[in-house]
Amino acid sequence: MDVQTLRLFRQVAAGATVTETALRGHLTQPALSRALRRLEHEAGAELFRRSGRLLRLTPAGHAFKRHVDLVLDQLDQGLREVGEIVAPGAGVVPLAFLHTFGTWLVPAVLSGFLREHPGTRFELRQHGEAGLEGELLDGTADLVITSGDPGHPQLHWSRLLVEPLRLAVPPHHRLAGHDRVRLADVADETFILLRPGYALRETTERLCAEAGFAPRIGFEGDEVETLRGLVTAGLGVSVLPLPHTAAFPAPHLELTDVDAARDIGLAWAAGRTLPPPSETFRQHVLDTVPRSSTVD
């Protein structure tokens, strides 16, 4: 079994199509298929079953993947540590974060760290919460900045900030001139929400339930800034964090009948020793970001 084939196996096992995996590995699809068949022959069991365009793991495949993940994680960590020994001060920190933090929190944290450690390089990825959890569990990222505790037994999480949430309304909305309103005041209006699976979607639905209603959903999206743009266009209202740019004129109103806020925290895999650059960055974030404070 060669390392490249194991990496290809892990990509397909994680849900990538054969076409996508072959492109990433600079292979033809038949060559990838042959490599996976050879791997199954060496493992002595069928590892995949076909489901439409995707290959799904069999029970034997799931068992095999757990050990492949451990082997590749250890190998990658060893290669990175060797590189850090050969080129001290030039380590790599794989960091993933919730996409809404890319315009304000992440740049501030990285710039502060790089002033003290200018030789460090970051591999950055943006996701929703489910994708961030996967980055840690797969070993693709060492650290993630996310909203809320993932609540996963294999992950550690530490709160950094509490970010207020506001009711975003169109510029000419009947409540636009107010500073503070009740969420119940818009119970009959159209809501613009993130798709299911995002923590902010779950938080919004919970807040609406606390205010005594279920939101009438008109639009669903994958990006907070897209939702903000739809609100600005007058297509509905939404519960969102405050914007960190002046690009969106939609008023963001404080809510008085619910505790509208979300936690922001740093997470890492339990039981995994971080390489020195990632551990140094983890300590920097925990020491310099004022934990449990509120950011407006």
Image (cartoon, rainbow, N blue to C red):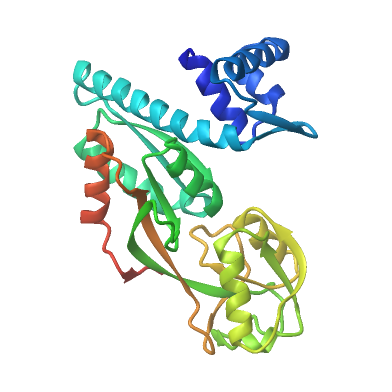
Q: Is residue 193 above or below residue 34?
A: below
Judged left or right of residue 24, residue 119 is left
Q: Nearer the viewer, residue 6 or 241?
A: 6
Position in image of residue 66 (x %, y %) = 47, 36
Position in image of residue 254 (x %, y %) = 52, 81
Q: How many marks?
A: 0
Q: In the image, what residue occupies the spot 25% across and 27% down?
A: 119
Q: Is residue 153 above or below residue 256?
A: above
Position in image of residue 150 (x %, y %) = 45, 59
- Residue 124 visible to the viewer: yes
Identify the residue at the far front of this view: 44
Position in image of residue 269 (x %, y %) = 36, 46
Q: Quadrant of residue 46?
A: top right
Judged left or right of residue 45, residue 213 is right
Q: In the image, what residue occupies the spot 69% across and 16% down?
A: 33
Judged left or right of residue 129, residue 188 is right
Q: In the image, what residue occupies the spot 58% across and 79% down?
A: 207
Q: Nearer the viewer, residue 259 or 174?
A: 259
Q: In the image, what residue occupies the spot 51% across and 72% down?
A: 165
Q: Is residue 254 above or below residue 137?
A: below
Q: Quadrant of residue 229?
A: bottom right
Quadrant showing the C terminus: bottom left
Q: Nearer the viewer, residue 244 or 106?
A: 106
- Residue 177 visible to the viewer: no
Q: Is residue 252 above or below residue 105?
A: below
